[in-house]
Image: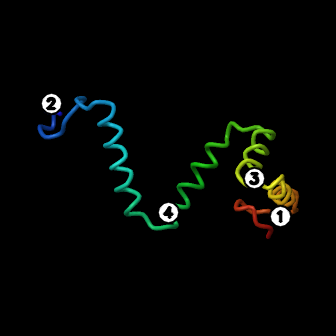
């Protein structure tokens, strides 16, 4: 891979193939996540999952839960009971 010099004089610009760019992203993500503690990783995954469900309606969410747990709706019913509880915090546990 030939790199073209950037205005900074040492950084390559726009010379990667799509495969190389994907590989660079993958290596960078591995490096970033390797340096994170478990609490940070959990927070990132939680936020990403929550964002990914933004466009889901009630039916989509029920199907996702049933598909994930594959338990004939048992966990969905448990979660719905938690949602219906008077005081539920963001993590879904009754307080």
In the displayed structure, 67 sits above or below 71; it is: above
Name the disc covering residue 87, or none. Answer: 1
In the displayed structure, 79 sits above or below 95; it is: above
Q: Which residue is mark 4?
A: 40
Quick one: label 4 or label 1, which is nearer the N terminus?
4
Quick one: label 3 or label 1, which is nearer the N terminus?
3
Does dot 2 land on a helix, a strand or a loop? loop
Tell me the mark number nearer the camera, choosing from 3 and 4.
3
Quick one: label 4 or label 2, which is nearer the N terminus?
2
Tell me the mark number nearer the camera, choosing from 1 and 2.
2
Proximity of marks 4 and 2: CB atoms separated by less than 8 Å = no
Residue occupying image coordinates x 88% and y 57%: 84
Crowd class of label 1 (few under 14; some 14 to 19; many from 20; radius 10 Å)? few
Image quadrant containing the C terminus: bottom right
Image quadrant containing the N terminus: top left
Residue occupying image coordinates x 38% and y 62%: 34
Q: Which residue is mark 3?
A: 70
């Amino acid at each position: 891979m030939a790199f073209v010099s950037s205005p900074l004089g040492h950084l390559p610009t726009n010379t990667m193939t799509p495969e190389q760019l994907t590989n660079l992203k993958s290596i960078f993500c591995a490096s970033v996540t390797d340096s994170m503690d478990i609490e940070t990783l959990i927070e990132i995954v939680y936020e990403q999952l929550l964002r990914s469900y933004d466009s889901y309606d009630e039916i989509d969410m029920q199907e996702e839960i049933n598909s994930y747990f594959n338990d004939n709706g048992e966990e969905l019913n448990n979660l719905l009971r938690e949602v219906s509880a008077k005081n539920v915090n963001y993590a879904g546990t009754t307080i």
